Amino acid sequence: MRAAFIVLPLLALAACQSSNSSSMGATRDMPPSQVRTVQLLGPNGELRGTASLEARPAGLRIAARVEGLAPGTYAIHYHRIGLCTAPTFDSAGPHFNPLTKQHGTENPMGPHMGDLPNIIVGASGKGEITHTVDGLMLTGGPNALLDADGAAVVLHAGPDDYKTDPSGNSGKRIACATLGA
């Protein structure tokens, strides 16, 4: 009888732990709510790619894939507002910048926490990046990407020059994905 009192709680604990992992790449110590996968949609609602964001102890990791684009280099950024109103996606607001820095990793006054590496699209029309922004959190704390109005991931028509404030001369916004609060 005593063994049942020990085994049953252990089985319940094991079941809870296995439900915390996710097929989207969450680690066992990260709850599924700390992983978000969103679709990047163009101005007419066409699928342009996906972005998966995962909270990690060091920062926020993005794995973004794009498709159906002309070969070239495209900027991608975190934007402050979780609203993607087509066709311009200006509703997503400026880059996420809680530390009030200037834009770009090559800018001595930068970078924004919303700055990400460019995506290079090959002849297949596809491209991808994986990048972690140190110190950025998905939720909770002073550098949390998600607040009451959410956030967005925005794909731009051109490359980011990594130095020109406020947006790296990256051109118009051609796809957007909203991240709810």
Image (cartoon, rainbow, N blue to C red):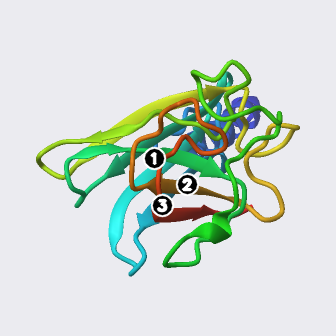
What residue type is disc 3 on? Lys
User: Which mark is nearer the camera, 2 or 3?
Assistant: 3
Can you tell which mark lies on residue 24? 1
The one nearer the camera, 94 or 6, is: 94
Residues marked 2 and 3 touching at CB (< 8 Å): no
Q: Earlier in the sequence, mark 2 or mark 3?
A: 2
SS class of the residue under badge 3?
loop
Q: Horizontal placement of 85 versus 65: left or right?
A: right
Q: Which of marks 1 and 2 is nearer the N terminus?
A: 1
Quick one: label 2, few (<14), some, or many (20+) residues within 10 Å? Answer: many
User: Residue 172: which disc?
Assistant: 3
- Type of amino acid under label 2: Val
Q: How far apart are marks 2 and 3 (CA)?
A: 14 Å
Q: Could you tell me which residue is drawn at 41 percent across and 45 percent down?
A: 64
- Residue 109: where, in percent of width, then height? 74, 23
Q: Name the residue under label 2.
A: 153
- Residue, far left: 123
User: How far, Cα to Cα, is label 3 from label 1?
Assistant: 30 Å
Q: Which of marks 3 and 1 is nearer the N terminus?
A: 1
Q: Distance between the residues labelled 1 and 2?
A: 18 Å
Q: In this view, does 151 lie to the left or right of 46?
A: right
